[in-house]
Image (tube, rainbow, N blue to C red):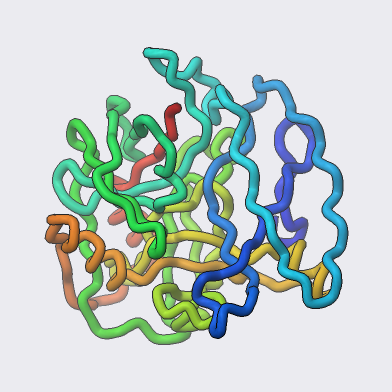
């Protein structure tokens, strides 16, 4: 998807590009390219394809590149299910992970507007139901209450501070219904210690992420959580504006921001000092029993 900008869905149509919007962190209120959230997935192979969107015109010089990716059509289920009882239907999907018994962490934009969340642990087992307990729109984080055992809590890294060039691992469910129905692992490095327009609450990372990775854990090479995957730069829109295609520019909310959010909402997460390095495969084994696939029900 990185070279093609967007992946072609199973129906053969090209989904709309991820959008960009003004960032509230831009100095002096200047417009900037925002981090488009990585929420949702294309419909499954059995779904009716949506009409192909009209191509976006190239923006005028100096214009803000506005617009967000549209939500999935109501009733589209990445796994071809009929949606759940009570008239609720899955409209989008994302990733979350266990931070305490009965508590999950994900992005605000994954849980926003959902009447409930359906939870499928990566390790398998019965589908669970979660509800939104607290959100922080500025950080783009959401805390969920889940009924049942979703897995053991992951530990957050308490120190030392992350450095540029440190290896990181993402674990989540990108493009569910198109790629593997199981979790996907990617590797990369911390590219910068701030996000778009010097957003101090985020890291820039080179680990590839796609729609559906939103809310998944970003782990260091010891298996500790150092961030929450949140967005990627819109390569197509940037290319329209600058003539150059950015490569692997992705973002995650810093782990310290997530810990502060959890503590503010009555959750004391596990924390641990950085220790001996593991392989990426071993880090994936740490994340696997604690990572969950989320479906937004409306």
The percent coordinates of residue 109 (x first, y second) are 46, 49
On the question of residue 168 being in view, the answer is: yes
Compare residues 219 and 73 and report the one nearer the observer.
Answer: 73
Q: Is residue 84 left or right of residue 277?
A: right
Viewport quadrant of the C terminus: top left
The percent coordinates of residue 67 (x first, y second) are 68, 55
The percent coordinates of residue 230 (x first, y second) are 47, 59
Q: Is residue 14 above or below residue 250?
A: above
Occupied quadrant, residue 222: bottom left
Q: Could you tell me which residue is drawn at 22 percent across and 53 percent down?
A: 99
Q: Is residue 112 above or below residue 148?
A: below
Compare residues 42 and 31 and report the one nearer the observer.
Answer: 31
Q: Could you tell me which residue is drawn at 22 percent across and 40 percent down?
A: 145
Q: Is residue 225 left or right of residue 42?
A: left
Q: Is residue 214 left or right of residue 258?
A: right
User: Total label count?
Assistant: 0
Q: Residue reaching furthest front?
A: 29
Q: Could you tell me which residue is drawn at 35 percent across and 31 percent down?
A: 116
Q: Could you tell me which residue is drawn at 65 percent across and 20 percent down?
A: 46
Q: Is residue 277 left or right of residue 84?
A: left
The percent coordinates of residue 61 (x first, y second) are 84, 75
Q: Is residue 222 above or below residue 17?
A: below
Viewport quadrant of the N terminus: bottom right
On the question of residue 190 being in view, the answer is: no
Occupied quadrant, residue 258: bottom left
């Amino acid at each position: 998807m990185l070279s093609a900008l967007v992946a072609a869905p199973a129906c053969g149509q090209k989904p709309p590009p991820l959008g960009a919007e003004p960032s509230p962190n831009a100095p002096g209120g200047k417009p900037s390219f925002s981090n488009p959230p990585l929420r949702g997935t294309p419909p499954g192979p059995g779904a009716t394809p949506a009409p192909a969107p009209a191509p976006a015109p190239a923006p005028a010089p100096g214009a803000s590149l506005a617009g967000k990716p549209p939500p999935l059509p109501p009733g589209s289920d990445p796994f071809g299910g009929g949606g759940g009882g009570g008239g609720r239907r899955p409209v989008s999907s994302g990733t979350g992970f266990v931070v305490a018994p009965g508590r999950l962490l994900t992005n605000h934009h994954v849980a926003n507007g959902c009447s409930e969340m359906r939870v499928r642990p990566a390790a398998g087992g019965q589908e669970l139901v979660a509800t939104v307990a607290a959100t922080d729109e500025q950080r783009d984080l959401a805390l969920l209450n889940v009924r049942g055992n979703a897995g053991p809590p992951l530990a957050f890294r308490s120190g030392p501070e992350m450095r540029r060039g440190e290896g990181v691992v993402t674990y989540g469910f990108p493009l569910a219904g198109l790629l593997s129905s199981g979790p996907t692992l990617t590797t990369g490095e911390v590219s910068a210690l701030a996000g778009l327009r010097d957003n101090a609450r985020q890291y820039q990372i080179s680990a590839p992420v796609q729609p559906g990775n939103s809310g998944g854990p970003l782990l260091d090479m010891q298996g500790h959580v150092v961030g929450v995957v949140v967005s990627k730069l819109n390569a197509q829109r940037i290319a329209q504006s600058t003539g150059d295609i950015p490569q692997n520019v992705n973002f995650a909310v810093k782990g310290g921001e997530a810990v502060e959010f959890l503590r503010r909402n009555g959750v004391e997460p596990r924390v641990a000092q950085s220790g001996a390095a593991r392989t990426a495969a071993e880090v994936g084994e740490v994340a696997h029993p604690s990572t969950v696939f989320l479906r937004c029900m409306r």
